[in-house]
Each structure stands twice: as C-alpha cells, then as structure tokens.
C-alpha cells in the first residue's frame, strides 16, 4: 500500500512522524509539503500534480484538501481528509472582515476549493467529536470518522532549557491567523488587566499580530515565533499556568503539549477543547473574566493541587492520544479505503 501525505507547513513535524509510524506498519509512505509546490493559493500547482502522478498512491492523506484533493480525484485515488478545524466558519468570518472585492473573492474561492475537496474525500477524519458534528451538518453526504491528532509524549519532558520569565508566569501559545480564535484572546486581555501583578506571556505570530500589539495590556509580553519543538518546550516548562483563551477551536495541539509538560491548563469551553482537557473544572466560558481570574488564582494559591493536575494531565494525554494508538486507527482506515 502506497500512502501519500500532503500537509501544511505548521504540521509537517507531526505528519512526518505519523507517516513513519504508518511505514513501520508495512506501508510505503511519502510526505509532500504543500507550500513547496504551490506559488499561489488561487492557481493549480501543476508541480504537485506531476509529483502525485509519479508517486501513484493508493491512498491520499491530506490536511490541505484543496487542489491536492482535486488532483487525487482526477487520478482516481481515494482521499482521507484530516479536518483540523471548522474552515466554513473561519472563512465566513474572514469574508466579513475583508473589504476589497479581490480579497473577498480570494476567500470565497479558497472556501469553495476546500469544500469541494472535502466533498471528494472517501472519508473525512475530523480531529474531535465536536468537529465531526460540524462536518455532518455541513456535509451530511460524507462518511465521517474521528481521528484525533497524534502526539509523541516522549519528546515532551523536562530535558530542555528554561526561558527566563517573571513569575507568576501565565503562558499561552497562540496562532494569530484565524480571526474567530483571536477574538477569544482579545477578550482575555480583560483578565490580564484584572491581574496587574501577574505576568502574561503569549507566543506565536500571524497576520493579526498588529491588532494584538495595539490592544494588549501592559503586563502581557508577546514572545513572537518559537522554533518547534525545542523553544516551545522551553517556554512551556518556564510557565506556572497554561491558558488557552480561544474563541473558536477544535483540538489544539498546544493544549495537549502543555499537559504533557505537566502544566495545569485553564481553557475556553468551546469546540473540541473539552475533549482534550483532563480537568474539566478548569474549563471557562469565553469572556468570563471573573471565572478566568478565579481559576488562575486558585491554581497559584494551591501549588500541590496544581502539580497533581499537571501529572494527571500528562497521563491523560499519553493514554488517549499517543502516536502508536492514532497510527493504528489510521492504518486500519487506510487498509479499508485502499
């Protein structure tokens, strides 16, 4: 069985390890980074098509589901679309924020490409149960099977350097690329303002970074881009409490990684986030400033309980989202499709 993985840049590290695990089970695998074949999101990347014809896969596993899915359909290759988020809602929000006709057209075209790409899929693999419900609502014609993101727990340990942060340090890793997610962080600024003696650190970058810079409170520091995984590990190790104040999310890897680093996690009760947070008491409603402040204070005032939550979080992630477990489920799905 020949399996071709096509992935986005930010997930290359994880997809390469997932592909290796599938290869260890007896398949021939190859990974293509979509951006290396596409010069424009609006134009068909013919270099990718030629590469796919050369590889002649029995199964395409993609988290892009754009032109790659269209090409796979053309060569009669079954498609597994690994859906990482509710792109329908994301593009609807993006379209509302765009003003020029050209940018509105580009957003609408990409949404159309991805919706059709998902439509071509033999099976859609959402990364959580919440997202599976969104897919079933949007595409009731599709076969849907949940496939959580796989993570290697072995690399997430204390064997790394620690960043110098001022304590108490409340940390988060965020993607300033998707507006509905970012709006949750903007609302979280009120939490930082309500806790002026605490130090808030947010790592990440993206096209909306200027908006964050313009509105962030004084006691919040933006760390910028961190190299993955070493600098991310060092950042997570240095924090006291990890927060994930997203306005929209499916199953963020950063929340899983923070728990593997044994950090207590306070997260917004949205989307699929409750499915990956070990201690449900720390889930907080979006915009509930008092709730965020109360939970963060409780964790810092009770270090023994916070440490136990951290240990339980690591065990929870190891038991439910290991690379071996997820690759086993994916391999069975691939055999069924091929």
Image (cartoon, helix red, strand yellow):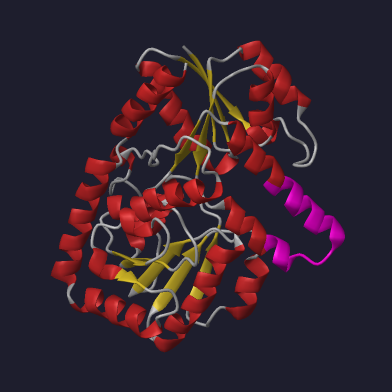
Residue 63 falls in which quadrant of the image? top right
The image shows residue 326 at horizontal and vertical percentages of: 34, 33
Residue 3 is left or right of residue 40, and the answer is left
Q: Going by the picture, which residue comes out furthest to the front? A: 141
Residue 144 falls in which quadrant of the image? top left
Looking at this view, is 220 or 324 the one in front? 324
Can you say whether 51 is above or below 132 in the image? above
Can you say whether 69 is above or below 186 in the image? above
Residue 121 drawn in magenta = no
The image shows residue 227 at horizontal and vertical percentages of: 51, 48
Q: Main secondary structure of the magenta part?
A: helix
Q: Is residue 177 visible?
A: no
Q: Is residue 71 visible?
A: yes
Which residue shows up at 47% across the image and 84% down it? 190
Which residue shows up at 71% across the image and 67% down it? 96
The image shows residue 131 at horizontal and vertical percentages of: 45, 50
Which residue shows up at 70% across the image and 33% down it? 67
The image shows residue 327 at horizontal and vertical percentages of: 35, 28
Question: What residue range appears in magenta?
Answer: 94-111
Residue 103 falls in which quadrant of the image? bottom right
Count numbered badges in the picture.
Answer: 0
Looking at this view, is 177 or 214 the one in front? 177
Can you say whether 30 is above or below 282 in the image? above
Looking at this view, is 20 or 126 the one in front? 126
Q: Going by the picture, which residue comes out furthest to the right? A: 101
């Amino acid at each position: 069985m020949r399996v071709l993985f096509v992935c986005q840049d930010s997930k290359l590290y994880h997809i390469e390890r997932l592909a290796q695990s599938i290869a260890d089970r007896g398949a021939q695998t190859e990974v293509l980074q979509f951006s290396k074949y596409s010069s424009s999101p609006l134009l068909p990347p013919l270099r990718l098509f030629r590469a796919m014809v050369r590889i002649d896969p029995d199964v395409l596993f993609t988290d892009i589901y754009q032109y790659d899915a269209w090409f796979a359909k053309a060569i009669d290759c079954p498609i597994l679309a690994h859906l990482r988020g509710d792109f329908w809602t994301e593009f609807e929000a993006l379209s509302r924020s765009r003003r020029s006709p050209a940018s509105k057209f580009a957003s609408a075209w990409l949404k159309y490409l991805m919706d059709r790409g998902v439509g071509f899929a033999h099976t859609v693999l959402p990364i959580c149960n919440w997202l599976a419900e969104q897919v079933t609502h949007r595409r009731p014609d599709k076969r849907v099977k949940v496939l959580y993101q796989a993570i290697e727990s072995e690399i997430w340990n204390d064997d790394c350097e620690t960043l110098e942060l001022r304590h108490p340090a409340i940390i988060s890793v965020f993607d300033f690329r998707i507006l509905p997610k970012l709006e949750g962080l903007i609302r979280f600024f009120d939490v930082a303002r309500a806790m002026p003696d605490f130090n808030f650190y947010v790592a990440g970058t993206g096209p909306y970074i200027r908006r964050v810079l313009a509105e962030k409170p004084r006691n919040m520091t933006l760390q910028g881009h961190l190299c993955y995984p070493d600098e991310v590990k060092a950042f997570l190790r240095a924090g006291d409490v990890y927060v994930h104040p997203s306005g929209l999310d499916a199953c963020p890897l950063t929340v899983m990684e923070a728990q593997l680093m044994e950090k207590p996690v306070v997260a917004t009760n949205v989307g699929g986030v409750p499915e990956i947070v070990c201690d449900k008491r720390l889930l907080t409603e979006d915009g509930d400033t008092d709730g965020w402040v109360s939970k963060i204070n409780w964790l810092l005032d009770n270090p023994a309980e916070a440490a136990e939550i951290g240990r339980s979080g690591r065990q929870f992630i190891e038991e439910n989202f290991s690379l071996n477990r997820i690759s086993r489920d994916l391999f069975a799905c691939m055999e069924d499709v091929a």
